[in-house]
Image (cartoon, rainbow, N blue to C red):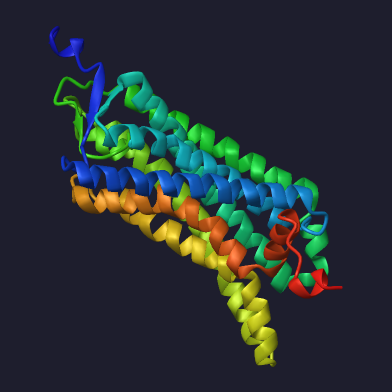
Amino acid sequence: MENQTTIVTYFVFLRFSNDPPVQFFLFLTFFFIYVVTLMGNITIMMVIRGDNTLTSPMYFFLSHLSFIDICFSSVTVPKLLDNIYGNLAISYNSCLTQMFFFLLAGTTECFILAAMAYDRYAAICKPLHYVQIMSRVFCRWLVGTAWTISFFNAMANTLSALNIVFCGPNIINHFSCELPSLLVLSCTEISLSTIIFLKTGGTLAIFSFFVIFLSYVYIVSSILKIHSAEARRKTFSTCSSHLIVVILFYSTGCLRYMTPIASSIIMDEYFSIQYSISTPMLNPIIYSLKNREVREAIKKLMGYKPLNSCNL
């Protein structure tokens, strides 16, 4: 037992490929995704903060979503790029730190998406009381509560992981330190950590998804009562971008975290790449393409002028 506690001081990630051309392609792909993620989300934040017309709660939440997406992607992608070209090791402390911030950013994104769904519900179903319901104080309270709950969730799971003994093997069958991938490496009882993880993560995910689901039930019900097809289309377009983001994030996130721990390595990596790397890149693109006000604000920021105005 004495020898078991001199344990693992570092972990080793699973390599995507040993083929140099494939490694080069993967490096360029993930580097491109990360650059686009940073540029896209920073642009959204700058546009919202710099444009006086984008002051509604929807854009307040979108600005915070962009900040979270930058954090979410930055937790894993820089180390992933390092892993592709050989540095597969990560220290025990760095691994748990990465896990903490991964849980913090992921849980906060769940709550921000729920807050955005509630905002769309208030705007479409309670238009006369929208300003009173979604006051600036209430919006800040929602964001602050999201970060606070997420912090305690990440802290609870990280502290439970500190009690796990890792005495070998130390190879993580994944590209980041997510808790399910660490639990399978434990050489001690993991039932308590598993219960804490499933109860905290499951409760928060189900609650936030329930808020989103219930909001859209009322939204769809209100839209169906509108007689004009054009009016229905315009009303639904105000929340279509959010709905796409929710589907992308929750579908893969739930499949990754709600499946058994010993599930397919390839599928786990695919789902993780989707919700933690691809979705943060796609969010600003989706909102830019689907939201006319955001598109116009971006054009204004870039100094874009229509050709006909240049000829005047």
How many numbered discs, if any? Answer: 0
Q: Nearer the viewer, residue 256 or 15?
A: 15
227 versus 276 height, above or below: below
Q: Nearer the viewer, residue 179 or 9?
A: 9
| 3 left or right of 12 in image | left
Tell me which residue sits at (64%, 61%) in the image.
118
Q: Nearer the viewer, residue 41 or 1?
A: 41
Residue 79 visible in the shown view: yes
40 versus 173 height, above or below: below
Residue 136 in the image: state x and y as whole percent: 79, 49
In the rendered image, which quarter contains the N terminus?
top left
Tell me which residue sits at (41%, 43%) in the image.
31
Residue 77 in the image: state x and y as whole percent: 40, 39
Residue that protrudes farthest toward the top in the picture:
2
100 versus 233 height, above or below: above
In the rendered image, which quarter contains the C terminus?
bottom right
Tell me which residue sits at (20%, 47%) in the image.
265
Residue that protrudes farthest toward the right in the picture:
312
Quarter of the image holding residue 124? bottom right
Residue 263 visible in the shown view: no
Quarter of the image holding residue 115? bottom right
Tell me which residue sits at (45%, 64%) in the image.
247
Residue 40 in the image: state x and y as whole percent: 57, 51
